[in-house]
Image (cartoon, rainbow, N blue to C red):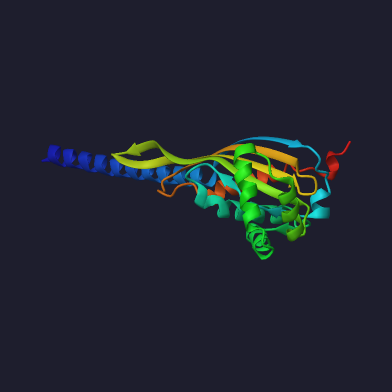
Amino acid sequence: MANHMTATGFFDAAKHTCARSLNGVLLLCIVYALHGCANPQVYSTVQHQAISLEPDSLQTHGIAFITPSTVTGQEEDKQALALIFADVLAEEHPDITIITLPETLGAVARNDLTDEYKHMFDDFKNSGIFDRIILRKVGEVTGVRYLAQLKLANFSQGTISRWSLLGIRMSQTKYADIRLFFQIWDSVDGTIAWEGVDELNYAHDTSSERAVAFRTVIETASRNLISQLPREDDQP
């Protein structure tokens, strides 16, 4: 009888120990997942070239967003891309007059430039150059000198399983990769005044099924590019 009680007590103690261990592991899983969500890993490579844009050029003359270009399959993201980038630029530089893409398109339509505007982009697809005369007209109807042209050259999202417990997936890495080009055109002489590109990888560990948001990576890349615009303290 004593041996039976001893064995029973042993198994009960073992059961409680296992339960506590399992609870501890689950707690660590939760902490790990929350920690991963709060600390995304961002890897960015930014290249830029200032051609004729001076530190106070945008503040003096303003900038208007024209229709972005994207890789095949991302055409529906054009409006969102321009909206997010304009929002970030306005936040970082409230001293710059910014004409958003809808405002630019409205000015183009009101001034009967729709066909010329479309023709300008058709030529751009083949040559990488905007028609100087039409570009000047767009600048005139928007009331600014500089025009912002964005190109989303790559955007992809995915998931990598990290580890699981008892067959249950406890953590996974959500990631998004983008390559974003930003060009500033001078509508007066039809040349590129500044250009830059950001190749960015954004990843975080999480237990959620939600993908990395398009807005999240575009905002991050936008800030990276905008931070490279000429500043007064860049002057020798």
| Residue 66 x/y as whole percent | 65, 52
Residue closest to the eye, 201 or 15: 201
Is there any visible trace of residue 7 in the rendered image? Answer: yes
Residue closest to the eye, 156 or 203: 156
Query: Is 23 positioned to the left or the right of 177 in the image?
Result: left
| Residue 35 x/y as whole percent | 50, 44
Residue closest to the eye, 94 or 37: 94
The image quadrant of residue 14 is: top left
Figure disc tally: 0
**Residue at the farthest right position:** 236
**Residue at the farthest bottom position:** 110
| Residue 64 x/y as whole percent | 71, 55
**Residue at the farthest left position:** 1
Query: Is 232 positioned to the left or the right of 127 in the image?
Result: right
Q: Quadrant of the N terminus?
A: top left
| Residue 57 x/y as whole percent | 82, 49
Which residue occupies 71% across, 51% down?
134
The image quadrant of residue 104 is: bottom right
Which residue occupies 67% across, 65% down?
110
Is there any visible trace of residue 25 in the rendered image? Answer: no
Residue closest to the eye, 168 or 49: 49
Q: Quadrant of the C terminus?
A: top right
